Amino acid sequence: MRPLSQKIMGAFFICLLASSCLGGPWSPRSVPESHNRKIHECDNWKQGTQMIKLPVFSHAWQIVENCNEYSGEAVAIAMVFFYNEWSLSFGDPNSNVWVALNKLMVEWSYISRPITAYDVSGRLIKNAYASGIALTQSMIWVKPIPGQPICESSLIHELVHIAIWSIKLTDGDPDHLGKVYSGWTIDHSALIQRINDQLCSLGI
């Protein structure tokens, strides 16, 4: 029997490559098609931020400032790649990571966030400008990079924090390879690089 993550990825890409899935766009059965199009599509005519439903994941959303940056489909593909690689590398026996991804809120915002935080080696740095933050167990903020694909952003890095948080429940290991918190290992850093390489090869 194939792992759950492989089944999900296979089903997702069949839908993605076909011109239509069951005669129309993917949508939850409980949501009318006309309403579903509204929550899944970014409106270029609207001013300000918009909250867009991410496909594949049951209760995952993203907040965007610009419809031309990071479509919901692209973000969902990145999350599917992440879950597949996570499952292969670390497993998900209690589905904690899958549940966390299904209720995730991703905020893309150009607002600079000066913070005191740890770098990837565990050094505490004051007044650093973050490229992404895991704000809670179910919300991340990521700063877009104009003209660059998702693989150049910190999205996958923040998903690792969310996955660790879903397992530990207390934190997402904010000091990475430092010794203050536990959870993050060199294997997690390698996973980020591996996934971003895969996404970059697809132009995502």
Image (spheres, grey):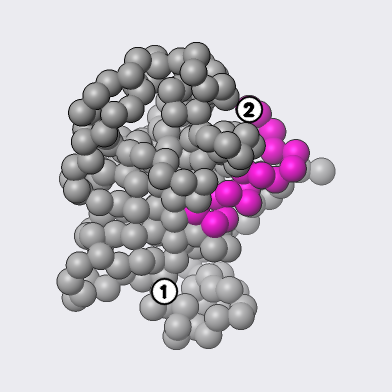
> For residue 177: magenta?
no
| Magenta stretch, residue numbers | 89-104
Residue 202 in view (yes/no) = no
Whether residue 104 is situated above or below residue 93 in the rendered picture: below
In the foreground, 138 or 189: 138
Looking at the image, is mark 2 or mark 1 earlier in the sequence? Answer: 1
Secondary structure category for the residue under label 2: helix
Q: Residues within 10 Å of mark 1 (few under 14, many from 20)?
A: some
Q: How many marks?
A: 2
Whether residue 85 is situated above or below residue 38 in the rendered picture: above
Q: Tell me, for residue 89, which label it has, or none.
A: 2
Tag 1: residue type? Ile
| Rendered location of residue 83, percent (x, y) | 58, 41
C-alpha gap between disc 2 and disc 1: 33 Å
| Rendered location of residue 173, percent (x, y) | 50, 28
Secondary structure category for the residue under label 1: helix
Q: Which residue is mark 1?
A: 39
In the shown orientation, is residue 130 left or right of residue 100? left
Residue ID at (45%, 22%): 176
In the shown orientation, is residue 151 left or right of residue 167? left
